[in-house]
Image (cartoon, rainbow, N blue to C red):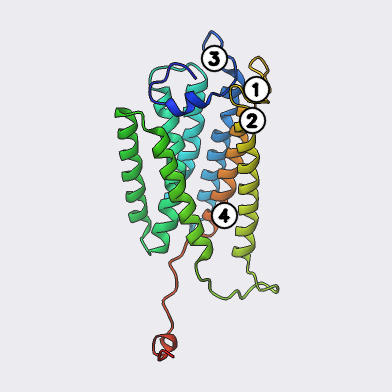
Amino acid sequence: MPGSSVSGWYAAVGDCEQVRSGLIRQPANAASAAAYLLAGGWLLAQSERAWSAPRRYRLLAAAVAANGVGSGLYHGPGWPGSGWCHDVAALAVPVFVAADGLGGMRGWDDRGITRAYLAVVASAAAALLALPVTNPAMLTAVAAAVLAETAVARRPRAPARASPDGTGPARRHGRAARVVMLAALALGSAAYLAGRTGGPLCRPNSLLQPHALWHLLTAVAMAAWAAHRIAYPVQPPAPPSRANRHTPAA
């Protein structure tokens, strides 16, 4: 989208929809950003309902909702600073995924994870304000989030006691959440790539915009991941049993 000196990566990819005059310059893409507000509000309600959920998940709900504000400004009026708001909000979610997974596995408490998360987001926000480094910052955040999720998925688990099939409610819930998240991300990414400017699905004058579908599906992916993590926060790996510690090496 023209007019942003900060969001060079997004502008270079292009979001197809024709930029109109007036307050809402890309109506389909701007309206679809409301999906992030709905997802953030729902996640806040989920975190308040789960009395045992760490308080940092309220920050996650705010980060998801911030994507609605940032995308709405970016695709709507496009005021100065809109691109910065868009980019910082976009970075805030994968940074949270990384901090939550890695910090939780290392046994950090809720306050420690929150401080680390806010420090990284603040540093990224300052960097994006000074330099057009959205592309490397986003790639780094996403890579860290993927590594954290991989580590969480592969960590040793305690034996399930309440499930007859031996999988346990947390594991089943986690698998379902990952299926929804990955399906939404796959479909959303396909829409994003095929619907960008010059892509096969790009119709600049249409109100059915693939980029708007990207907004909707990434909001679903964020909600699916966060709902599972709110219900089942990451626990540090259990220490080795005394028997295992004293077993002589073969």
Mark closer to the observer (2, 4): 2
* Residue 131 x, y percent position in the rendering: 31, 29
Q: Nearer the viewer, residue 193 or 241?
A: 193
Give the Cα distance between marks 3 and 2: 21 Å
Q: Secondary structure at mark 4?
A: helix
Q: Is residue 225 visible?
A: yes
Looking at the picture, which amino acid does disc 1 mark? Cys
Looking at the picture, which amino acid does disc 4 mark? His
Mark closer to the observer (1, 4): 1
Is residue 127 shown above or below 107? Answer: above
Q: Answer yes or no: do the residues labelled 2 and 4 have beta carbons within 8 Å?
A: no
Q: Is residue 87 left or right of residue 223?
A: left
Looking at the picture, which amino acid does disc 2 mark? Ala
Sequence-wise first label, 1 or 4:
1
Mark closer to the observer (3, 2): 2
* Tag of residue 25: 3
Q: Quadrant of residue 86?
A: top left
Sequence-wise first label, 2 or 1:
2
Give the Cα distance between marks 4 and 3: 36 Å
* Residue 145 x, y percent position in the rendering: 46, 50
Q: Please tell me how crowded label 3 is: few (under 14), some (14-19), or many (20+) other residues with Cα within 10 Å.
A: many
Looking at the picture, which amino acid does disc 3 mark? Arg
Q: Answer yes or no: do the residues labelled 1 and 4 have beta carbons within 8 Å?
A: no
Q: Please tell me how crowded label 2 is: few (under 14), some (14-19), or many (20+) other residues with Cα within 10 Å.
A: some
Give the Cα distance between marks 3 and 1: 17 Å
* Residue 25 x, y percent position in the rendering: 54, 14
Task: Name which residue lies at 51% across and 24% down.
Answer: 72
Task: Say which residue label 2 marks.
Answer: 194
Sequence-wise first label, 3 or 2:
3
Task: Say which residue label 1 marks.
Answer: 202
Task: Say which residue label 4 marks.
Answer: 228
